[in-house]
Amino acid sequence: MDGSALEILNEINKDGEQQPHDPGDLTRIPDIKIILIGDSAVGKSKLLERFLVQSYRERTASTYALSRYLYDYVEPETGRQLLIDFWDTAGQEQFEKLHPSFYHQANCCILAFDVTRKVTYRNLDGWWDEFRSYLPDVPALCIANKIDSDPVCTERTFKFSEKNQLPFHFVSAADGTNVARVFSDAIALAIQNKDNPPDEDLAEMYRLLEAPSPTNAASTDTKSTATGPTAGL
Ligand SMILES: Nc1nc2c(ncn2[C@@H]2O[C@H](COP(=O)(O)OP(=O)(O)O)[C@@H](O)[C@H]2O)c(=O)[nH]1
Ligand SMILES: [Mg+2]
C-alpha cells in the first residue's frame, strides 16, 4: 500500500488504537468492491487516505502507489460484517486506459474531478463511457474535489452529474469536507448493488426459482414449461 498511509497506520497502531487488519493484506476475500476513477492528480488517493486513516499529508506529486485497500465495515442496521475492497488507480490513468480487471465485478464507482483544473471535469465523459462500457448497471457517484482551494466553486452547477443522474458532492481531501459522507454513500450503494443484482430479469428468475408458484407447487410436471424466454407472457 501507499508508503505514507502505511506509516500513518503504524503510528496509529503504536498509539494502541484498534486496527484489526492491515488494509494492505490482500489475502482476505472481499465482499464488496468499490473503484475510484478520474484524471491523474484529482486527489483519488488522498481521498482514500483521508477516509481510511483520517489523515492527509501534503504531497507535490500525484501518487504512484499500490492501489488496493481493504476496509472492515459493519452495517449499522444489521451488524453484518463486510470486507470492502477499494481499488485506487496506481498512476496508470495518466498514460493509458485502465485494465479491464480494474472494473471487473465492481459494486460502485466514485468518479472524481478537480475543481481547480477544468480539463479534469471535461474528461469525466471519457471516464464515464469507459466505466459504463464495462459496467452498464453499477451505481456511481460524482465528486468535485479540492474545494478548499476554490470555495466559490460550490456556488456553481456542474451539469455532468445531472445529465447522467448521479449523486454529486463537493469534497476536500485536504480539510475532510464531505469525505466520510461520500464513502458512506458509496458503501451503501455498493451493498445495495451486491444484495440486489441490477439485472432485473435474472433477479426475477432467481425469485421464481426460489419461491415455487402455486402451479408449480401443485404439480411437478409444470416445471419445464416456465423456462423459455416467453414464459409468463
Ligand atoms: N488543495 C488540495 N489539494 C489536494 C486535495 N486532494 C489532493 N490534493 C493534492 O493533489 C495532488 C494529487 O493528489 P493524489 O491523491 O495523488 O491524486 P490522484 O492521482 O488522483 O490519486 C497532491 O499534491 C495532493 O496533495 C484537496 O482536497 N485539496
Ligand atoms: Mg493516485
Image (cartoon, rainbow, N blue to C red):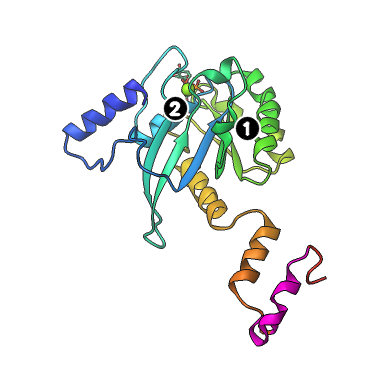
- Residue 214 location, x and y as percent? 67, 84
Q: Looking at the image, is 227 positioned above or below residue 179? A: below
| Near-viewer residue (233 or 22) | 233
Mark 2 Cβ inside 8 Å of ligand 2: yes
Q: Say what secondary structure mark 2 lies in.
A: loop
Residue depicted at 36% across the width and 60% down the height:
79
- Res. 143 visible in picture: no
- Indicate which disc, 2 or 1, sits on the residue closer to the N terminus: 2
Q: Which residue is mark 1?
A: 155
Q: Residues within 10 Å of mark 2 (few under 14, many from 20)?
A: some
The quarter of the displayed image where residue 130 is located: top right
Q: Say what secondary structure mark 1 lies in.
A: helix
Magenta segment, principal secondary structure?
helix
| Near-viewer residue (224 or 102) | 224
Residue depicted at 68% across the width and 43% down the height:
136
Q: Quadrant of the C terminus?
A: bottom right
The disc labelled 1 sits on which kind of residue? Glu
- Residue 203 location, x and y as percent? 64, 61
Q: Quadrant of the N terminus?
A: top left
Mark 1 Cβ inside 8 Å of ligand 1: no
Q: Which residue is mark 2?
A: 67
Q: Residue 39: within the magenta?
A: no
Image-based side of 208 in relation to 105, left or right: right
Marks 2 and 1 close (CB-CB < 8 Å): no
Instruction: Please report the bounds of the magenta region as a residue range.
Output: 215-228
